[in-house]
Image: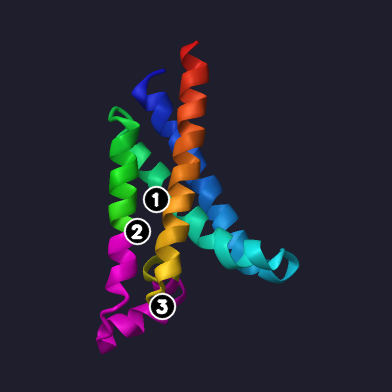
Amino acid sequence: MSHSKDRLIYVGVTVLMLAAGLATRTWAGYMPEFVALHAGDALWAAMIYSGFRVIGAHKRLGWAVACSIGFCFAIEISQLYQADWIHAVRETKLGGLVLGRGFLFVDLIRYVIGILIVYAADRLVRSSQAK
């Protein structure tokens, strides 16, 4: 498959992960508690992985795993910084979605799980295409 076609597919996956993640926030009251608590962060991290695949469709899958884990961890750790200006950004809808609001160790676990699930799906699809 060409890198251009790959990028287009990953753009679609990124949009799908974004929509699914927002849905877990919007309709959390209609979901099982476990899903409402954990799926949004896992889907956000999966979206980051697919975003890195858009950028690096020609690179190895492990590159996207490493970059997305690094990015997600950096965002989460940045939540320990509590200056007034960044707090004001985090209080906006977009700022809160992108930067989060407060450090939670469990979010790091959710990110890794989300990335590993989408990575495994990516590998599975790629291996089935190679046959």
The residue singled out by tag 1 in the image is: 48
Residue corresponding to mark 3: 101
Percent position of residue 40, x then y: 54, 61
What predominant SS class does the magenta segment belong to?
A: helix
How many badges with numbers are in the image?
3
**Residue 109: x %, y % from top left:** 44, 59
Residue at 39 percent across and 78 percent down: it is 102
Instruction: Identify residue for label 2.
Output: 72
Residue drawn at the location 37% of the way across and 19% of the way down: 2
Left or right? Give the position of 122 relative to 87: right
Camera-nearest label, 1 or 2: 2
The answer for how far apart the CA atoms under marks 1 and 2 are is 8 Å
Marks 1 and 3 sit apart, C-alpha to C-alpha, by 18 Å
The quarter of the picture where the N terminus appears is top left
Say whether residue 66 is left or right of residue 46.
left
Categorize mark 2 by other alpha carbons within 10 Å: few (<14), some (14-19), many (20+).
many
Q: Within 10 Å of the Cα at label 1, are there few (<14), some (14-19), or many (20+) other Cα atoms?
A: many
The magenta segment: 73-96
Residue 115: x and y in percent read 43, 47
Question: What amino acid type should be assigned to the residue bearing mark 3?
Answer: Arg
Determine if the magenta segment contains residue 69.
no
Q: Secondary structure at mark 3?
A: loop
Q: Label 3: how many residues lie within 10 Å, few (<14), some (14-19) or many (20+)?
A: some
Task: Give the distance between the C-alpha atoms of the residues marked 2 and 3, in whole angstroms.
Answer: 14 Å
**Vertical relation: 56 (above or below) 39:** above
**Image x and y of residue 103, in percent:** 37, 75
- Which element type, helix, strand or loop, lies under badge 1? helix
The amino acid on which the numbered mark 2 sits, given as a three-letter code, is Cys
The first of marks 1 and 3 along the sequence is 1
Residues marked 1 and 2 touching at CB (< 8 Å): yes
